[in-house]
Image: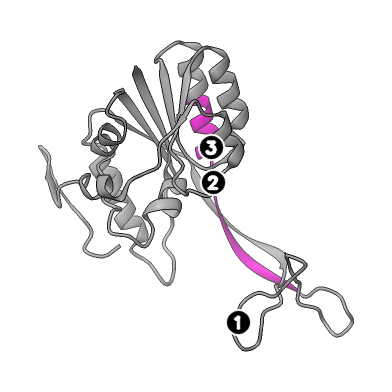
Amino acid sequence: MKTRVYIDGFNLYYGLLKGGPHKWLDLERFCDLSFPKNIIEKIYYFTAPVTARPNDPEQPVRQKAYLDALATLARVEVHLGTFMSSVVTMVMADCDPVTGKPVYRNGIAAPKLMPNGKPQMVPVLKSEEKGSDVNLASYLLRDAFGHMCECAIIVSNDSDLLTPIRMAKATGMVIGLMPPRERGSIDLKRLADFKVSPRQSLLTQSALPAKIVTQDREIIKPAFW
């Protein structure tokens, strides 16, 4: 089947790639190897520009290098949302004084209480990625109602995509799912026509070259990630 792949970049990173050696991933080769019975015509990669952190000032540099590398792949389209940081007030979790781990009561994380019995509130720096799920859903529905392909493969665990996927299926589009984290949304798995789990061996076979030479520059794989 003629197929398009829709990848939630942050879902893929935090669900499958973080902490591992496969962040310099060739999305074309990985999709071709993962779905050999499908004709992968287009791969949409949805993400957002990250900002430098005090403990990791080079994070935006590494991300830009990877996005530049993806731009050399003919079938990959990168679509950017936004990354927002704000200070919000939240309830502080109660933690075990010995292990430092959160305390759970009846299966629910317990709040830290002040002497007057009220929950202790603390300001927290919260970072949120905005737009990727909406962008993914928009391109999926555009392609479904425009009959641009026979099959759509979603690389995400985000249950917010349930409604647009149902709408896409109603057009006759076949829906595949590759959940980056195996313990993903049960409803997404039930809705998909088929599911393929990512294989570590295929990730290993799908690395981009450490140095990519274009007409006007060289793109170098970051030494540390």
Q: Residue at x 54, y 36 (%)?
A: 189
> Badge 1 is on which residue?
100
Q: Position of residue 18 (x, y in %)?
A: 39, 58
Label 2 sits on a secondary structure element that is loop
Q: CA distance from mark 3 to mark 1?
A: 34 Å
Q: What type is the residue that disc 1 sits on?
A: Gly
Badge 1 marks a residue whose secondary structure is loop
**Residue type, numbered disc 3:** Asp
Q: Position of residue 201 (x, y in %)?
A: 26, 49
**Looking at this view, is 113 or 191 the one in front?**
191
Query: Which residue is disc 3 drawn over?
Result: 133
Number of marks present in the image shown:
3
Colour option used: one colour
Q: Are marks 3 and 1 in contact (CB under 8 Å)?
A: no
**Which corner quadrant of the image does residue 101 belong to?**
bottom right
- Residue range in magenta is 121-139
Give the side of residue 57 with respect to residue 113, left or right: left
Report the residue marked by disc 2.
184
Image coordinates of residue 162 in percent, x first then y, are: 60, 31
Which residue is found at the position 52% from the left and 29% from the top?
Answer: 192
